[in-house]
């Protein structure tokens, strides 16, 4: 029997590590982002914009855009050591993110208060995943997707990590969630070398969210660009909806 797929697809990426034993004082947060694309927008807008950008700057479309590599000017991004060139490159990339239609949901775990609140704190990735999936479900319910299956795409991280993630994902989708209802999602793992437009866009916006939470008063153009993309409630509030900080 054919499965009934929704008109949406979700790409997930992270910023920071989810470990709690040693906390980076410069970046003491774990960020998980969920980029929800309408498939038509993904096919006709997101992919062409990013492919055109790659052909222009690299001459081919095989370079994978990683925020860390761009930030450190390494690998294919070594040509960005010139400040003028890098500024123009980032401005173009920011413009692509702005022009690409998607809805953004992000969970930010503040590690230090998280550890202080619980004597045996849960895996931050699992907490962020649960909050995120709940809000993706709320948004898709508003779009009247019903029981149609929506794929949630994540990068492979390792056999053990992927096994733990899959187990937690199934637990949340089986009813371990705030509305206590089955969630019509399917998890799709892809290789880190996968040239996925959705995963690359998710990667580019995760760290700016973490930096905004840590230093809300600091100039953060990347965050300013994506702010309008956050899922909001009927009153226009993003906090607790498109952007969930915990605790």
Image (cartoon, rainbow, N blue to C red):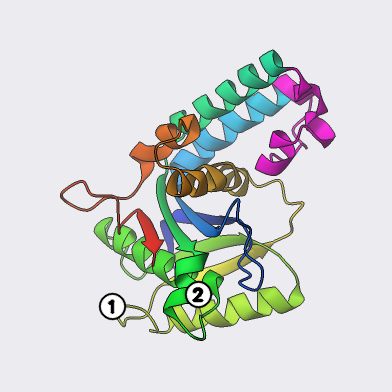
| Residue sitting nearer the eye, 13 or 24 | 24
**Residue that label 2 marks:** 115
Say what secondary structure mark 1 lies in.
loop
82 w.r.t. 131: above or below? above
Q: Is residue 247 magenta?
A: no
Of circles 2 and 1, which is in front? 2
Callout 1: 10 Å neighbours few (<14), some, many (20+)?
A: few
Q: Is residue 58 visible?
A: yes
Say what secondary structure mark 2 lies in.
helix
80 w.r.t. 36: above or below? above
Q: Is residue 3 visible?
A: no
Q: Quadrant of residue 175?
A: bottom left
* x 41%, y 72%: residue: 184
Mark 2–mark 1 Cα distance, whole angstroms, equals 26 Å
Callout 2: 10 Å neighbours few (<14), some, many (20+)?
A: some
Q: Is residue 66 magenta?
A: yes
Q: Sequence-wise, which precedes: disc 2 or disc 1? A: 2
* x 40%, y 42%: residue: 216
Query: Hey, which residue is sitting farthest top in the picture?
Result: 84
Q: Which residues are magenta?
A: 56-82
**In-image side of 110 versus 198 (left or right):** left
**Residue that label 1 marks:** 179
User: At which x and y percent is residue 145?
Assistant: 32, 61
**In-image side of 65 versus 105 (left or right):** right
Q: Of the numbered discs in the image, which one, if any, rests on residue 230?
A: none
Give the number of callouts.
2
User: At which x and y percent is residue 118?
Assistant: 45, 81
* x 51%, y 45%: residue: 211
User: At which x and y percent is residue 90?
Assistant: 61, 25
User: At which x and y percent is residue 100?
Assistant: 46, 34
Q: Quadrant of residue 75?
A: top right
């Amino acid at each position: 029997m054919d499965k009934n797929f929704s008109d949406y697809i979700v790409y997930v990426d992270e910023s920071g590590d989810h470990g709690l034993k040693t906390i980076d004082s410069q970046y003491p947060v774990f960020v998980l982002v969920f980029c929800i694309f309408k498939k038509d927008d993904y096919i006709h807008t997101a992919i062409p914009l990013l492919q055109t950008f790659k052909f222009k700057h690299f001459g081919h479309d095989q370079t994978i855009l990683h925020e860390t590599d761009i930030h450190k000017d390494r690998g294919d991004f070594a040509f960005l050591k010139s400040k003028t060139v890098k500024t123009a490159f980032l401005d173009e990339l920011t413009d692509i993110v702005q022009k690409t239609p998607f809805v953004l949901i992000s969970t930010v775990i503040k590690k230090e208060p998280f550890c202080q609140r619980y004597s045996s704190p849960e895996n931050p990735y699992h907490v962020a995943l649960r909050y995120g999936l709940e809000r993706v479900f709320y948004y898709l319910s508003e779009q009247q997707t019903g029981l149609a299956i929506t794929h949630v795409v994540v990068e492979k991280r390792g056999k053990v990590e992927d096994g733990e993630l899959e187990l937690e994902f199934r637990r949340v989708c089986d009813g371990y969630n705030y509305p206590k209802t089955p969630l019509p999602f399917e998890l799709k793992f892809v290789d880190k070398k996968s040239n996925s437009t959705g995963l690359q866009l998710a990667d580019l916006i995760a760290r700016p969210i973490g930096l905004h939470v840590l230093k809300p008063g600091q100039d953060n153009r990347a965050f300013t660009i994506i702010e309008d993309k956050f899922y909001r409630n009927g009153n226009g509030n993003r906090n607790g909806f498109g952007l969930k900080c915990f605790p």
